[in-house]
Image (cartoon, rainbow, N blue to C red):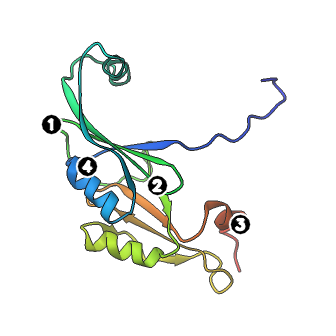
């Protein structure tokens, strides 16, 4: 690529989540969020296979024996890769929004209110009231929630492009 040429936009593939109970997480994300189960919970064992070597490199250690993994997908093909590690530590309850880390991931559902209700009814948490962008002008809504494991999810009623292309933070 030449120095003067801007890169083209990349596409999003998947997000990886570490969860304390893989079966419970798969059940929540399939039954409540409606994701497709691509690969049911499986065991990955440290060995000399390609996946074993790749994990050694990613974890920057050979001091692991096994973990469990499952793969799910949204309706538009974005993957949710879930990991359950032995001796996992609970999610830090003291949310520090300023800390460099994955803040949240976002999903879109035209029935935002229904999805938020299902999340709460199945052990999640609503972090804020449902808010409108362009209140009184457009029906774009959003809400931050948590899954039952403390992972923060932002829920949109409309696409990211529609919500932000008009300047969602402009004063009326």
Residue wearing tag 1: 87
Pick whichever of labels 4 and 3 is earlier in the sequence.
4
Do callouts 4 and 2 mark residues in contact (Cβ within 8 Å)? no
Residue at far bottom of view: 136
Residue name at image x 52 percent, y 42 percent: 13
Do callouts 4 and 3 mark residues in contact (Cβ within 8 Å)? no
Residue at far top of view: 48
CA distance for labels 4 and 1: 13 Å
Pick whichever of labels 4 and 2 is earlier in the sequence.
2
Residue 75 placement (x, y as % from top left):
49, 57
Q: Tag 2's secondary structure?
A: loop
Residue wearing tag 2: 74
Residue 70 placement (x, y as % from top left):
31, 42
**Which picture quadrant has residue 171?**
bottom right
Q: Please determine whether, in this image, residue 142 is positioned above or below residue 75.
A: below
Residue wearing tag 4: 91
- In terms of depth relative to the viewer, which is nearer, 60 or 113? 113
CA distance for labels 2 and 1: 29 Å
**Which picture quadrant has residue 135?**
bottom right
Q: Tag 3's secondary structure?
A: loop
CA distance for labels 4 and 2: 24 Å
Residue name at image x 65 percent, y 69 percent: 169
Pick whichever of labels 1 and 3 is earlier in the sequence.
1
CA distance for labels 4 and 3: 34 Å
CA distance for labels 1 and 3: 45 Å
Residue name at image x 82 percent, y 31 percent: 5
CA distance for labels 2 and 3: 27 Å
Foreground tag (1 vs 3) = 1
Pick whichever of labels 2 and 3 is earlier in the sequence.
2
Residue wearing tag 3: 167
Do callouts 4 and 1 mark residues in contact (Cβ within 8 Å)? no
**Residue 149 makes an appearance in the image:** no
């Amino acid at each position: 690529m030449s120095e003067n040429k801007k890169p083209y936009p990349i596409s999003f593939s998947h997000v990886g989540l570490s969860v304390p109970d893989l079966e419970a997480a798969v059940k929540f994300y399939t039954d409540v969020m409606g994701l497709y189960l691509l690969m049911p919970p499986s065991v990955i064992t440290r060995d000399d296979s390609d996946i074993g070597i790749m994990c050694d490199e990613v974890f920057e250690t050979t001091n692991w024996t096994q973990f469990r993994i499952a793969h799910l997908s949204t309706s538009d093909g974005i993957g949710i890769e879930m990991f359950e590690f032995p001796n996992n530590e609970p999610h830090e309850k003291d949310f520090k929004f300023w800390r460099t880390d994955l803040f949240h991931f976002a999903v879109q559902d035209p029935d935002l209110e229904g999805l938020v209700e299902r999340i709460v009814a199945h052990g999640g948490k609503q972090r804020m009231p449902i808010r409108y962008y362009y209140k009184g002008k457009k029906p774009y809504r959003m809400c931050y929630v948590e899954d039952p494991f403390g992972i923060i999810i932002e829920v949109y009623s409309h696409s990211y492009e529609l919500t932000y292309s008009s300047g969602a933070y402009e004063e009326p």
